[in-house]
Image: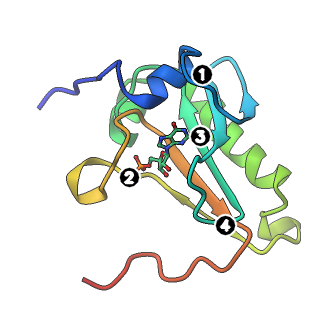
């Protein structure tokens, strides 16, 4: 099934500046901002500026520059928030939800960076 991008989704509106956000990092290709309903002391959403629906869409269609920028921004936030275990941090979780089984709520690709407390089991038992 072809990817269909809905340009009325909430992150598209944030990227167009129609809705405010609490920006953490902004680069040419990527915007990262605090989640409106944080599930942990650190809960940052990393969003590519291009019109991509989910992880597989982004990584099959985005340019190398977009992908590199997105990955670097994610790593920079992990470092800046003091979460990286290699630098004395207590760790973190990066989550990307997609489709009905992934329970993706906003249909514009994003990763969640969560940290600042023990995060519990990765996936609840069925
Ligand atoms: P998903 O289930 O799509 O992976 O997660 C969507 C996330 O977007 C949720 O954690 C939700 O709290 C967050 N969110 C939804 N609307 C807004 C908004 O208007 N602003 C911000 N900053 N986050 C939002």
Q: Which residue lies furthest to the bottom in this view?
A: 125
Secondary structure under tag 2 reads: loop
Give whichever of discs 3 and 2 has the lower sequence position: 3
At numbered mark 1, what does the secondary structure look like: helix, strand or loop?
Answer: helix
Rate crowding at label 3 as few (under 14), some (14 to 19) or many (20 or more) other CA atoms within 10 Å: many
Q: Are marks 1 and 4 in contact (CB under 8 Å)?
A: no
Q: Dot 4 lies on which element?
A: strand
Q: Which of marks 1 and 3 is nearer the N terminus?
A: 3
Residue placed under numbered mark 4 in the picture: 92
Q: Does the residue labelled 4 lie within 8 Å of ligand 1?
A: no
- Mark closest to the chain's N terminus, 1 or 2: 1
Q: Which residue is identified by label 3? A: 46
Q: In which quarter of the image is the N terminus?
A: top left
Indicate which label's residue lies in the foreground, 1 or 2.
2
- Residue beneath disc 2: 97
Most extreme residue toward the left is 1
Sequence-wise first label, 1 or 4: 1
| The C terminus sits in image quarter | bottom left
C-alpha span from label 1 to label 3 = 16 Å
- Report crowding for label 2: few under 14, some 14 to 19, many 20 or more residues within 10 A (C-alpha): some
Whole-number angstrom distance, CA of label 2 to CA of label 4: 16 Å
The residue tagged 1 is 65
User: Could you tell me if residue 64 is visible in this image?
Assistant: no
**Would residue 57 be seen by someone viewing this image from the given angle?**
yes
Residue beneath the point at 66% across and 80% down: 118
Residue toward you, 91 or 125: 125
Looking at the image, is mark 2 or mark 4 earlier in the sequence?
4
Which quadrant of the structure image shows residue 76?
top right
In the rendered image, the vertical position of residue 106 relative to residue 61, given as above or below? below
- Distance from Cα at disc 1 to Cα at disc 2: 23 Å
Task: Provide residue 47's location: percent of width, then percent of height.
Answer: 55, 34
């Amino acid at each position: 099934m072809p990817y269909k991008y809905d340009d009325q989704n909430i992150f598209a509106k944030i990227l167009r500046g129609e809705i405010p956000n609490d920006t953490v990092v902004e680069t040419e290709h990527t915007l990262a901002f605090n989640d409106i309903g944080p599930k942990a002391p650190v809960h940052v959403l990393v969003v590519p500026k291009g019109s991509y629906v989910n992880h597989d869409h982004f990584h099959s269609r985005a340019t190398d520059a977009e992908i590199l920028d997105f990955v670097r921004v994610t790593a920079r936030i992990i470092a800046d928030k003091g979460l990286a275990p290699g630098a004395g941090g207590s760790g973190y979780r990066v989550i990307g939800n997609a489709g009905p089984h992934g329970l993706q709520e906003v249909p514009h690709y994003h990763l969640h960076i969560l940290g600042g407390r023990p995060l519990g089991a990765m996936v609840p038992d069925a």
